[in-house]
Each structure stands twice: as C-alpha cells, then as structure tokens.
Image: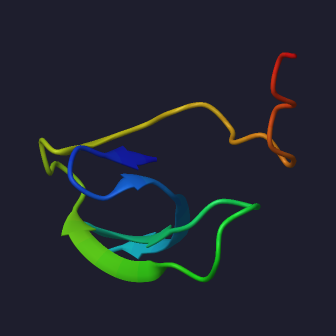
Amino acid sequence: MTHREFGPGWVQGSGVGRVTVRFETPYSGPGRVRTFAVDDEELEASGALPLRPRPSSA
C-alpha cells in the first residue's frame, strides 16, 4: 500500500471496513501503524516493495 502522506507500507490487517497499514520498508527502521477506512482516497494499492535497496549506479 502507499499513502499520499505517509508513503509506502504493508497491510498488517483488515476487516469491518478498515485496513491497518505499517509504514515501513524492509530496509527502514520500524514504522508507524495507522488504520484507515478501506475507501480512503489517500490510500492506494501498490506493488511489492523490494527486499533489498537497489544498488546505486556508479
């Protein structure tokens, strides 16, 4: 998932019209957890995050 304000994250749980997202990546520190309505316009589905950061071009 991606949120316009909070950035990329992953779904930790969902139900009863809500979705809980943890805003962190595999290569970041622990992130915040937020719960939204499933139809929140600021939240959108996104592709899987890479498990490792991409190497920089030299």
Can the viewer see residue 16 in this picture? no
**Color style of the picture:** rainbow
**Which residue occupies 38% across, 73% down?**
15
Which image quadrant is residue 58 in? top right
**Which residue occupies 60% across, 83% down?**
30
**55 or 1: nearer the viewer:** 55
46 left or right of 28 in image: left
**32 or 29: nearer the viewer:** 29
Which image quadrant is residue 28 in? bottom right
- Label count reads 0
52 left or right of 25 in image: right
In this rendering, is residue 49 above or below 15? above
Q: Residue 24 at x, y = what percent?
A: 56, 67
The residue most toward the top is 58
Q: Residue 50 at x, y = what percent?
A: 78, 40
Can the viewer see residue 27 in this picture? yes
Q: Residue 48 at x, y = what percent?
A: 68, 38
Q: Residue 13 at x, y = what percent?
A: 50, 75
The residue most toward the front is 58
28 left or right of 13 in image: right
**Which residue occupies 69% across, 42% down?**
49
The residue most toward the left is 41
In this rendering, is residue 51 above or below 29? above
**Which residue occupies 16% across, 48% down?**
39
In this rendering, is residue 33 above or below 36? below
